[in-house]
């Protein structure tokens, strides 16, 4: 325990001693590094957690700095009020940019932040109100509880205090209900939305948070320098922030810290030594840095932190604390009685242009039964599955779930109503623990927001979510694997983890997309036993499957599709003898040809 | 504003649009084939234009040494892979492929009487250099990470932009320069003087785009590139190597980039770092086309060119601010038009 925490203790210790042993330029450098860290931590959230990128963070730093400078000089505002104004301004700008770009695919945000970064920088340089290229001077000192912050050591405490509190709150935030949802963004929109995560909302939250951190850094910068001009807020600087994250390892908060040190200190050295060495006022550090970045991106795209991390012991697994073990799982919703109709399809038709993928399909699924949907390749099973799970909309016909129509719902709404699904190609977050993956399924059953989680106000509920996830794993027989990374499990177990994740949502209906695909014989037997247990608990299960042996042993009823039409429905033994099914699967039995 | 001024600004805007349209075309092509968002397109422009300036002033174009350097790095990269397989005889072969063209150009540049040659011949040499430059950049920078995410490729682009931009200062110095018009003079059209050079710019852009259209529509190589753009894996299974497609896309990007750089240098002063901003305006046009549609990108180029031209009349200090903020309403429109999530790539 102690050894594992040692680097953190040493780091904080070094920060405490720094103002006592350093002074003048080195301490000032450390302050600048701290300001970069604040910006880069925002990028770790945006890029490392959310899988998005911004080149325009320097513009947000500039908005914070210029808000501070202009409001305290021209308007005579209190510095702290200018922080609020700056935060409101950056939030509004980030919301606007995020809102227009984040509904589309990933590369629009970075491209628009490129343009944004240039535009804001040019605006600073050309606006007479903001002092043009000379900028704004004569910013009053920052007062705090009657003190005036003027010395480097005072700013050292302020800046690194902000850094450490951001690290602590972000760490807490990521380890919570909404934090899991943020981390799920990298697992793909489809999976996250099916778990009830509003992916657009979380992308925008991450972008706004990153912009706000940048704004705070700019605000402190303005009072540390006591003047501002456009130069530090150029697009080039925005790109450098991103590189700091990439060098250090953008997947981890400490990677962001490492990157800022690794980038800023040698850069300073290169800047002063390279031009002296080569004797020309060229931009050699740009060449060296560009080339170094290319090499790092090609050779170590994860950055240096993961390599550093291996130097000291890692936590293998966390034992469950007594308070966590005693937590009660979340309350469950009232379930329909066995035999009640849960899902009813009536004449569901789906057309893609001229192609009729599903033609007037009707059937029912009841509580406490396993209904299997089978058919040859191209029969339209997956299309129907997507219509039921609200990924596609049917062209006509009705789908009623628990008596309510779902044709106009999205995946999130359907999940909320109690329909939970797994995926044909396993969609787990491979680096997250099995327990966290399963807890993601309970997303819609929690209430606390990321703000509460950041300050650890969500613990009681979080313990209940964890207990729910453990409960689901227990039902699936995987509790002993709870702390392992999901990606380390064999495929068969990963499929079961997906089922546990679906169970954590407390569903009435479980939709399974080819759950037996790629499993070995014994794994299939285990899966069948699990599904039988769940059926006996009263769950309705609809599964799409290719493996006929698996289906015939397990299913209570079978619906057979071919060329988009339902050709048979009945008990497995009836289906086996059904002439249309034999025709579809074996093709023209008894034909002389 | 009088009608005359509006006409003049319109003509200026269309001229700019022709250049942005070419850039947008190259950006869309490179993105579709390789998923690279090719920020250094701007550097290819300035390197092409400034090499021509240097050549005309009697200096050897130093770009050719950069080509030789890139060729050596590419040889080294190929060599490492070859040594792992143990077939040493292929080392020479790889050297010839990677270094042949740069060395040939080196020989040409230092043996031909460049300053006294005809303008068109000088231009041809510059275009040849950039045609070698593009594929070498692809080989050295992007190909080793060809399977990485769009984001990593974008970061590589930005890193390459920084390196090339700094190198530009070293190769060409800080001074800005301008190229002479291909043909001097002007004529009257509806009471408005039209310079022959804008005819050159607009005409050559249209001809180049039409030629590329025919190339993609009818030639086997064009079809191979289109196939790769639609489905990389599928094209690979049909025997179209993605590395070949990437090199071909960058070859076109190199030629188109250098040509648009030369065109723009005949209308305004260009220095080593001017390319980035001009290239980004090409991006705004390409983004209007969703980085996928060539005709919409062309319409986008027209919008960007006209906006810039009229903005420089009303608020010249803010003209670039206006052009770059144009991206927000455009993205808003695209986001409304698409309306739903694009399925992300893995």
Image (cartoon, coloured by chain):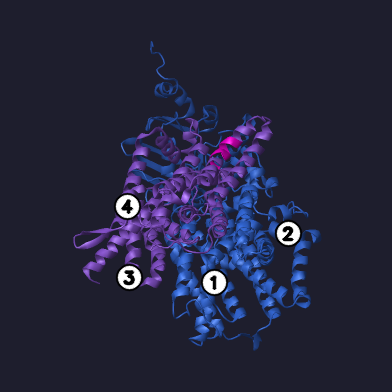
Query: In this figure, which residue is indicated by the disc labeled 3?
Result: B313
Q: Specify which label sits upstream in the sequence, 2 or 1.
A: 1
| Number of the front mark, 4 or 3 | 4
Q: Secondary structure at mark 1?
A: helix
Look at the picture and state if B80 lies above or below B184: above
Kindly identify the residue that appears in the image at 40 percent across and 45 percent down: A392
Q: Which residues are magenta?
A: B95-102
Q: Which chain is blue?
A: A
Q: In the image shown, does B318 or B273 lie closer to the viewer?
A: B273
First of labels 4, 3 by sequence position: 4
Image position, residue A470 (x, y; %): 65, 51
Answer with left or right where residue A52 lies relative to residue B32: right
**Mark 4: which secondary structure?**
helix
Quadrant in the picture for residue B84: top right
Which quadrant is home to the C terminus of chain A?
top left
The answer to whether residue B30 of the structure is visible from this angle is no
- Which residue in the structure is indicated by mark 1? A231
Name the residue carrying label 4.
B200
Q: CA distance from mark 2 to mark 4?
A: 80 Å
Q: Do circles 2 and 1 both sit on a common chain?
A: yes
The answer as to whether the residues below labels 3 and 1 share one chain is no
- The front one of B295 and A231 is A231
Q: Quadrant of residue B302?
A: bottom left
């Amino acid at each position: 325990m102690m050894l594992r925490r040692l680097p953190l203790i040493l780091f904080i210790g070094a920060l405490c001693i720094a103002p006592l042993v350093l002074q003048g330029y080195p301490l000032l450098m450390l302050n600048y590094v701290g300001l970069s860290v604040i910006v880069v931590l925002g990028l770790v959230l945006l890029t490392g957690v959310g899988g998005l990128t911004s080149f325009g963070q320097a513009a947000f730093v500039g908005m914070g700095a210029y808000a501070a400078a202009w409001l305290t000089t021209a308007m005579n505002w209190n510095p702290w009020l200018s922080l609020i104004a700056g935060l409101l301004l950056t939030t509004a700008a980030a919301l606007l940019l995020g809102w227009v770009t984040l509904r589309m695919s990933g590369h629009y945000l970075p491209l628009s932040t490129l343009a944004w970064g240039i535009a804001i920088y040019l605006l600073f340089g050309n606006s007479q109100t903001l002092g043009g290229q000379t900028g704004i001077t004569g910013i009053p000192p920052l007062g705090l509880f009657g003190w005036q912050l003027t010395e480097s050591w005072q700013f050292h405490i302020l800046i690194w205090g902000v850094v450490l509190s951001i690290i602590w709150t972000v760490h807490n935030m990521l380890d919570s209900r909404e934090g899991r949802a943020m981390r799920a963004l990298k697992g793909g929109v489809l999976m996250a939305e099916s778990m009830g995560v509003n992916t657009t909302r979380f992308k925008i939250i991450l972008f706004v948070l990153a912009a706000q951190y940048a704004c705070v850094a700019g605000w402190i910068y303005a009072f540390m320098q006591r003047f501002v001009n456009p130069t530090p807020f150029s697009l080039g600087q925005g790109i450098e922030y991103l590189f700091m994250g990439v060098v250090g390892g953008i997947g981890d908060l400490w990677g962001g810290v490492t990157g800022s040190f690794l980038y800023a200190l040698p850069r300073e050295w290169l800047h002063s030594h390279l031009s002296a060495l080569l004797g020309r006022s060229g931009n050699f550090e740009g060449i060296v840095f560009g080339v170094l970045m290319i090499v790092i991106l090609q050779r170590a795209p994860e950055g240096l932190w993961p390599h550093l991390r291996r130097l000291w012991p890692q936590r293998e697994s966390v034992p469950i604390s007594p308070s966590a073990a005693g937590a009660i799982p979340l309350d469950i919703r009232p379930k329909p009685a066995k035999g009640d109709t849960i899902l009813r399809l009536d004449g569901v038709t789906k057309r893609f242009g001229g192609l009729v993928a599903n033609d007037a399909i009707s059937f029912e699924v009841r509580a406490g039964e396993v209904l299997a949907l089978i058919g040859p390749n191209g029969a339209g099973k997956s299309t129907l599955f997507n219509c039921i799970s609200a990924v596609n909309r049917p062209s006509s016909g009705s789908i009623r779930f628990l008596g309510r129509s779902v044709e106009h719902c999205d995946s999130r709404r359907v999940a909320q109503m109690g329909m939970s699904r797994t995926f044909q190609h396993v969609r787990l977050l491979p680096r997250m623990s099995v327990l966290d993956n399963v807890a993601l399924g309970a997303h819609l059953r929690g209430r606390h927001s990321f703000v509460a989680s950041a300050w650890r106000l969500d613990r009681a509920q979080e313990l209940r979510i964890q207990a729910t996830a453990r409960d689901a794993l227990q039902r699936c027989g995987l509790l002993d694997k709870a702390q392992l990374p999901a990606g380390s499990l064999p495929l068969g177990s990963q499929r079961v983890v997906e089922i546990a994740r679906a169970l954590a949502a407390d569903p009435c209906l479980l939709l399974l997309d080819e759950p037996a695909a790629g499993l070995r014989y014994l794994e299939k037997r285990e899966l069948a036993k699990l599904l039988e247990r769940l059926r006996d608990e009263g769950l309705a299960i609809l599964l799409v499957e290719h493996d006929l042996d698996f289906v015939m042993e397990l299913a209570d009823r079978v619906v057979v599709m071919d060329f988009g039409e339902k050709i048979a429905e009945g008990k497995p033994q009836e289906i086996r003898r059904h002439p249309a099914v034999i025709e579809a699967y074996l093709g023209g039995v008894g034909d002389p040809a | 504003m009088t009608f005359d001024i509006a006409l003049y600004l319109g003509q200026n805007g269309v001229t700019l649009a022709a250049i942005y349209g070419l850039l947008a075309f190259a950006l869309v092509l490179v993105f579709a084939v390789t998923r690279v968002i090719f920020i250094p397109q701007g550097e290819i422009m300035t390197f092409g234009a400034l090499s021509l300036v240097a050549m005309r002033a009697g200096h050897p174009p130093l770009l050719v040494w950069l080509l030789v350097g890139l060729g050596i790095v590419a040889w080294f990269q190929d060599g490492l892979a070859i040594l792992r397989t143990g077939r040493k005889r292929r080392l020479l072969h790889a050297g010839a492929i990677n270094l042949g063209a740069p060395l040939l150009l080196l020989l040409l540049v230092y043996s031909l009487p460049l300053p006294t040659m005809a303008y068109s011949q000088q231009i041809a040499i510059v275009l040849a250099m950039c045609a070698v430059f593009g594929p070498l950049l692809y080989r050295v920078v992007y190909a080793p990470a060809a399977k990485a995410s769009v984001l990593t490729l974008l970061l590589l682009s930005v890193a390459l932009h920084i390196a090339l931009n700094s190198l530009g200062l070293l190769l060409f110095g800080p001074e800005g320069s301008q190229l002479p018009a291909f043909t001097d003079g002007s004529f009257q059209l509806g009471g408005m003087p039209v310079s022959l050079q804008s005819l050159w710019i607009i005409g050559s852009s249209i001809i180049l785009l039409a030629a590329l259209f025919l190339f993609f529509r009818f030639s086997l190589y064009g079809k191979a590139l289109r196939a790769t753009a639609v489905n990389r894996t599928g094209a690979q299974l049909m025997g179209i190597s993605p590395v070949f497609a990437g090199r071909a896309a960058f070859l076109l990007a190199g030629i188109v980039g250098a040509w648009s750089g030369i065109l723009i240098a005949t209308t305004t002063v260009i220095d080593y770092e001017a390319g980035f901003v001009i290239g980004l305006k090409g991006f705004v046009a390409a983004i209007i086309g969703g980085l996928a549609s060539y005709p919409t990108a062309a319409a986008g180029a027209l919008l960007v060119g006209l906006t810039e031209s009229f903005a420089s009349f009303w608020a010249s200090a803010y003209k670039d601010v206006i052009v770059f903020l144009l991206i927000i309403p455009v993205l808003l429109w695209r986001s409304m038009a698409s309306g739903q999530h694009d399925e992300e790539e893995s």
